[in-house]
Image (cartoon, coloured by chain):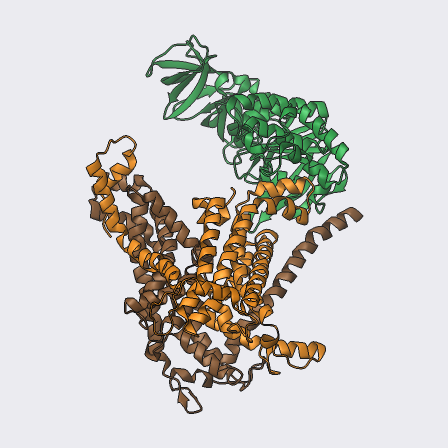
Chain colours: A orange, B brown, C green
Amino acid sequence: MAPVTERSVMLERDAQLEEKNLFQKLKDTCQAASFLAPFLIMIILFFAVPVILTAVLAFSGMDFKLQWNFVGLDNFIRILKDPVIPQVAANTLVYVVFTCIINVGFGFLLAVMTAYFIKNESVGLFFRTLWLLPRMTPSVVYALLWIWFLEPTENGMLNIIFKSLFDMQPHNWIQDNPMKVIIFANGMIGASFGMIVFSAAIKSIPEDYFRAAMVDGANDFQIIKNIIIPFLKWPIMFATIWQTLSLLTSYEYILLLTDGGPLFDSEVLSLFAYHKAFANFEFGYGAASAMVLVIIGALITLLMLKLFGYERMMNPSKLGN
Amino acid sequence: MGLIQKDRLETIIPRVMVYVVLVIVSLPLFIAYGWLFLNSLSDGAFGGIIPNKFTLQNWRFLWSEVRIGTTAFQSIWPITWNTFVLAAGITVIEILIAALSGFALSRMKFAGKDLIMKLTIFLHAFPGVALLIALYIVLQKLNLLDKLLGVILVKVALELPMATWMMKGFFDGIPWDIEWASYIDGCNRLQTWWKIIIPQLKPGIAAVAIFAFMSGWSEFIYAFTFIYSPENYTLAIYLKNLIGDFKMLDYGLLCAAGLFYMIPTILFFIFSQKSLMKVSFGGVKGPN
Amino acid sequence: MKVIFENVTKKFGNFTAVDNLNVKFKDGEFVALLGPSGCGKTTTLLMIAGIYKPSSGKIMFDDKVMNDVLPKNRNIGMCFQSYALYPHMTVFENIAFPLKLKKMSKDEIKKRVMQAANKVEIGHLLDRKPGQLSGGQQQRVSLARALVKEPQIMLLDEPLSNLDARLRINMRAEIKKLQKDLGINMVLVTHDQTEALTMADRIAIMNNGKLQDFDIPEELYENPKNLFIANFIGNPPMNFIDVELVEEEGKYFVKNEVIKLELPESSRERFDFSSCSKQLVLGIRPEDLTITESKCNTLQAEIYVVEPLGRDKLVNVVIGERKYKIIAPPKFNADTGDKVNISLNFAKIHLFDKTSEGSIRRNRV
């Protein structure tokens, strides 16, 4: 790391006043380029090249031999004709919509409970930390907890509960309700995202607004409706779009819990692409499926930048203030 | 008086309800993690909830090889070392690169700065995992497939936009006046760097480092996809295989192994309780 | 409506914000809670509002104990220092908000919002959002929102501190007029003594959670009960001199290393010399000191600096080690270092016990 130079300090401060010649500007840019070089190389190698590569691969029939043989639009035509695609698309929609509802809705609920109702800061913090635990737990361990919880024998937690309550025979929960399982498992992780963003936003609402509303005659429910939700309009929108985007493209927990099964009952598009590439070694076909996600991903990202502006993207709890 | 009693109830009831609801919805978390701990130390051949006899047998993977049928699992220690190398490698490389780029974005003036800032934010939001297939080909061409370094570089690249942005923020937070004052007080450039800037940067770097380490330690999908030689396995892959073979058979063993894998997570929670919420946004860009 | 505090204490953890407060506001009275920051005045206000509950003691409106009554059922209006206008609502919606929560009919709401808005002259701003208003306009909206409920009591938390100086003077008069017109109770929290002195019927001075005195402005100014009040009220502040009380040949003197002054006969009626300690603090306001030629029973001082204030001059002098302020007529002229004599208006001096800090004035019958 090179030290800050007096000259660079001067330049930053007096940039407006100082007339700089072209040579000077070039020199500054070169200096900055040397600082940014590792960053840019990494970005080019692992973002730019893969984006282009995905696009190129999508038009090839590359398989386990890793050979480029271009097949034109064949892969995309195959996607449209693939008999499992309607189910995969429907699964993706159900998965994204319902998980997102849990993420944002439950996250909001947790935030309101821990940051508004519970006035004792350390109690609120305790519960928020607790809910951060699933997110910080390695995904494999988190999956293990669910596998045990839903264990199909009479020793599974849920089966024990249902047996003692309703005298029910053991169920194979993951087999029978794969979509519900992946929605709940992902929902509990994602809820902490909403919780963190929303509780910070609630904490940043000036106390006077709550007092004013109380004096004006609002009860807790009306305060949530008339003060908290309007103030959190932008963070809620942000979290919704952000989560939609991440859910659309991530499949880690699905892979660990159901692996898309049974058959294609919980296969979503991102996992479909993964399976095509790494289970069937149809890299070309997988890339074509992934290309759909890359395009949707880029579009949603651009939409977010348009909606929220650049600066606010990095600090969503301050949105709208 | 009726009104007063009603008002009293109206204040108390929501609070009580909130506590009740919060405890009920959090109960599964208590049970799940409590079970993980208790079961790792108890002798229940099948994964019931009530722990049986105390035993250390479940932790046998620490000192002997684990067998299922005729196949033996390899020792956990080289795998733990791999995991550590992965996490530490990600941390060090990410900090170094992000410090350089964060400094440039905060303190330097150059053509195209605005563009790079916007690019950074764009990439922060862009879901990198969608590029997994292409990344496989890139690593193959770079001859980094099935190597820890390959996973390290991919992870660093994916986390760089956020890390750079955080670093930039920390540099922005150091007022120019302090730097000026140090020059006036007689520091040279190097002294200013070491005595003024770095000390103020320490907490920020620590936060970025902890999150980078944690995410590297927990990394599953890239390691699982890009690494296939058992000698390069990390704990995530090891545990995934263990679960595949031992679920419904020996939850005690799985719990112990899971808990062993979670040690850094647990330490992290114990030691960074207070500061967790303040910096956690940087760390929450997980799989979803 | 009367507002009564009976042994009210409010604690936050180990910190006592309000300590055993006993005070009674009369019906239709304009009361100011005055004190430095952290003295417990805002806590007191928020207890009237019902946002904080007293840790012990009773708060009563007339003869009803209000401790457990929710803010919304107290029929209060409140203005905040930050105005707390809801940024996502228009001015109209802001003012209508309390009425909407009461589930009033649309026509009734409209009528009453217009009335309240016209009372504070913001009828033309109803469609705007708070962000489009100036500070003074926002202040008026927050007043209208508090008034629209036709509250029995209005609470104002530092309402003027975010306005510029000129606007503040205007609003001072307007709020006072509003209160007189409506005849409702008003409680004003402020750290600005001028605000309290000009607006309130009576002032409750607080310090460290304790009520120092509760009285009309004139009485607090003329006869401060203790050193804190004497020091806090008045601008420029009162001058203080540490003295010892001595009796020589039936006459009372106050003296220290540099001064010795004879107290006139009349002071025996004002002060209780018999039972007080000998260590006193003499207080005198800058306007009760005059620069004279006479050397008899005066203080010898040296000019430190003269500050012209327009209407008169503020003369800073040094006596011994300490500095004092004197209000002099505008024609007074002197240079730094000049020696002058200063006479005291003995009818206006204040004497405080040095240890208890209380005034040794006899209680009037």
**In the foreground, C205 or A26:** A26
**In the foreground, C228 or C306:** C306
- The image quadrant where one finds the N terminus of chain C is top right
Q: Choose top left, top right, bottom left or bottom right for residue A177.
A: bottom right
Residue at image point 73% right, 53% down = B9
Q: Choose top left, top right, bottom left or bottom right for residue B227.
A: bottom left
- The image quadrant where one finds the C terminus of chain C is top right
* Picture coordinates of residue C50, whole percent (x, y): 67, 43
Image: C157 above or below A55: above
* Picture coordinates of residue A252, whole percent (x, y): 47, 68
Image: C129 above or below A281: above
Q: Residue furthest top?
A: C331
Q: Residue furthest bottom?
A: B70
State left or right for residue C26 relative to residue A284.
right
Image label count: 0
**In the foreground, B66 or B43:** B66
Residue at image point 59% right, 53% down = A112
* Picture coordinates of residue A139, whole percent (x, y): 47, 69
Residue at image point 24% right, 53% down = A1
From where the camera sits, is residue A224 visible? yes
From where the camera sits, is residue B1 visible? no
State left or right for residue A79 relative to residue B222.
right
Residue at image point 58% right, 54% down = A108
State left or right for residue B152 relative to residue C165.
left
State left or right for residue B142 relative to residue C40.
left
Image: C354 above or below A234: above
* Picture coordinates of residue A297, whole percent (x, y): 46, 56
